[in-house]
Image (spheres, grey):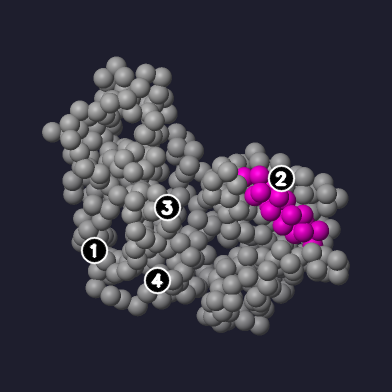
Amino acid sequence: MLSKFYLYKGKGFKVEKGHPWVYTDEIEEYDGDYNNGDIVEVYNHRREFIGKGYINDQSKITIRLLTRDIDEDIDEDFFRRRLHTAWDYRKKVIDTSSCRMVFGEADLLPGLTIDKYEDYYVIQSLALGIDRYKYIIVKLLMEEFNAKGVYERSDAKVRELEGMEQKKGFLTEPFDTMVQITENGVKYYVDLENGQKTGFFLDQKENRKAIHKICKDAEVLDCFTHTGSFALNAGLAGARSVLGIDVSQHAVDCANENARLNNLQATVKFECHNAFDLLPKWSKEGRCFDVVILDPPAFTKSKDTVKSAVRGYKEINLRGIKMVKRGGYFVTCSCSHFFTEELFRKTIAEAALDARRTLRQVEFRTQAPDHPILWNSDESYYLKFVIFQVL
């Protein structure tokens, strides 16, 4: 018999409308014993069933719902169905050679990320409840999705909010974690063990493709290049020259290796610089480019740091806009959920005003469809991406 949790009257409106999280201050009482990680049932104050999910009373997000069907058991067949549903969706909407196979709450598997890199899979578990099913999920990936190997990258700090240690390592027999993938015709070496997140930023796949049309015969500057993905797409699209900069020498070394892998080393170069120091210097020197790309890391990962993030975004966008030749193109992104689309647009507009430039929007995009946005879960929408012409 599963423990039953009842919500306060006037609480739980979001979860009743489809949001998968129940917060600790929404729970009035419960019946039955439980251990953290157990599956429990959730009811509203009228004792009407809402859903089933796993509990962790150490987390502010106390219960994460897995199903709204009272008769659906959480077992191996449940995860088999969820994984096949996620995979069938992706086969319809995106190139699946390398993609995000499971995007947590948006695939009704809260706390779980699965990224596919050719025949190898990376799992990231961010919640105690999903950790219990990790080896069932690995078994299914091996038996039903032809995984050659599975690696764990549960080395995110957010696990500590769940009372869990960060973890990484093989979940199958060891394999070479430097994997080669191809995306939009560009080849990359992806370091599953030590690369950012799970090894690569798959969410920008379609956005990287979108810059091809503005980069032919252009002189391109790619800031925060990481391992060179936007820069290499610009080079493949026929740019006259591309310079990618990143504050990490390791990232620059990886990017140069990727340039050689694509035979683009004559056109696409990478250097180690801090964009916040370099762009003001080059701007004063009057250096300009046909295309400037900004793909910075998230300046804010909580509501508390949004104000300081606004200053950072405005400053870097101001500098970037100033370095675009009249009639050239400016590409800018934000990957923070807390930095909303409205705030993103407002900040860029203010940066353009201070730069005394007019921006003409070419295209506004979000994350690739293998990172689907669940309309009753705001947290699933985080990536904003815009291409402008600078007039």
Residue found 46% across the figure and 62% down from its top: 197
Give the alpha-carbon distance from disc 2 to disc 3, as whole Å: 28 Å
Residue 230 is situated, as x and y percent measured from the top left of the image, at 60, 65
The residue beneath circle 4 is: 193
For the residue pair 153 and 240, the one nearer the viewer reads as: 153
Give the alpha-carbon distance from disc 2 to disc 1, as whole Å: 46 Å
Does 219 sit above or below residue 293? below
The disc, 1 or 4, on the residue closer to the chain's N-terminal end is 1
The residue beneath circle 1 is: 142
Question: What's the residue type where badge 4 is placed?
Answer: Glu
Give the number of the mark in front: 3 or 1. 3
Question: What's the residue type where badge 3 is placed?
Answer: Val
Magenta stretch in the rendered image: 306-323
How crowded is the residue under tag 3: few (<14 C-alpha within 10 Å), some, or many (20+)?
some
Give the number of the mark in front: 2 or 3. 3
Please indicate, yes or no, whether residue 226 appears anywhere in the rendered image.
yes
Question: What's the residue type where badge 1 is placed?
Answer: Met
The answer to whether 327 appears left or right of 244 in the picture is right
Taking the magenta stretch, the answer to whether it contains residue 316 is yes
The disc, 2 or 1, on the residue closer to the chain's N-terminal end is 1
The residue beneath circle 3 is: 158
Does 108 sit above or below residue 213? above
Question: What's the residue type where badge 2 is placed?
Answer: Thr
Give the alpha-carbon distance from disc 2 to disc 4, as whole Å: 36 Å
* Disc 1 element: helix
Give the alpha-carbon distance from disc 3 to disc 1, as whole Å: 27 Å
The disc, 2 or 3, on the residue closer to the chain's N-terminal end is 3
Residue found 68% across the figure and 61% down from its top: 293
The residue beneath circle 2 is: 347
Does 256 sit above or below residue 11? below
